[in-house]
Amino acid sequence: MNLISVSALIAAIAFVVLVVFVSRTLFRLERVFREVETTLSETQKDLHDVSVETVQFIHTSNHLAEEAKILVRNSNELAKDMCERAKSLDVLAKSVEEVGVTIAEMNEKVRDTASNVTNTVKSSTEKVSQALQWGNTAIDIWEKFKTKREGKKKNGQSNFNDSTV
């Protein structure tokens, strides 16, 4: 065997070793590419699911935004209605207040009138009481006068000049 044959044999062995390592590397690379393909396929599927969910979320968000607009509009209308009702209640409250003032004034007039009537009754009562006393005194005097007169008639005197009367 000569040098060329040995060299060719070494080159052939080296080539076989190289082919073995390159094929192992290519098989591993093929496995990696399959895993990458599987991962990409799963990622595509997940991305599709996420995009579908995102679209649904956007639709739901838009729907909720519209409902929120309607709610705000209704709230504004309700607030306006409440303001109008509050204004009408202010008018009612003012009317009630005026009625209360009128009743208070009327109560004051009734108290004044009652006070005047009470004072008049007291004054009249005193005058009536005084008149009754004068009347009782007049009756007492009349009775004494009558008694004395009857006593004098019994005694035969008919003169009214008695100073004890």
Image (cartoon, grey):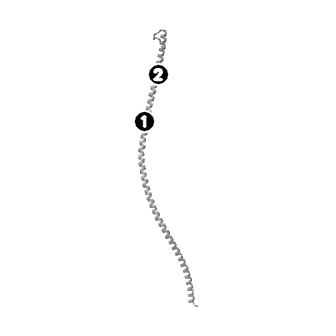
Residue reaching furthest to the front: 154
Residue reaching furthest to the right: 1
Q: Residue at x 47, y 18 (%)?
A: 139
List x then y, in percent, for residue 106. 42, 36
What residue does disc 1 label? Answer: 106
Say how many tags the image has: 2
For mark 1, give the secondary structure.
helix
Residue 72, which numbered label? none
List x then y, in percent, for residue 45. 49, 70
Quadrant containing the N terminus is bottom right
Marks 2 and 1 in Cβ contact (< 8 Å): no
Q: Which mark sits nearer the N-terminus, 2 or 1?
A: 1
List x then y, in percent, for residue 58. 45, 63
Vertical comparison of 85 with 106: above or below: below
Q: Residue at x 44, y 29 (%)?
A: 117
Q: Type of residue at label 1?
A: Met
Vertical comparison of 20 with 39: above or below: below
List x then y, in percent, for residue 54. 47, 65
- Residue 6 image-quadrant placement: bottom right
Vertical comparison of 57 with 142: above or below: below
Q: Type of residue at label 2?
A: Leu
Mark 2 or 1, which is nearer the eye?
2
Q: Residue at x 54, y 78 (%)?
A: 27
The CA distance from mark 2 to mark 1 is 37 Å
Check disc 2: other Cα within 10 Å, few if <14, some if 14-19, many if 20+: few
Check disc 1: other Cα within 10 Å, few if <14, some if 14-19, many if 20+: few
- Residue 12 image-quadrant placement: bottom right
Residue reaching furthest to the bottom: 1
What residue does disc 2 label? Answer: 132
For mark 2, give the secondary structure.
helix
Vertical comparison of 16 with 156: above or below: below
Q: Residue at x 48, y 12 (%)?
A: 150
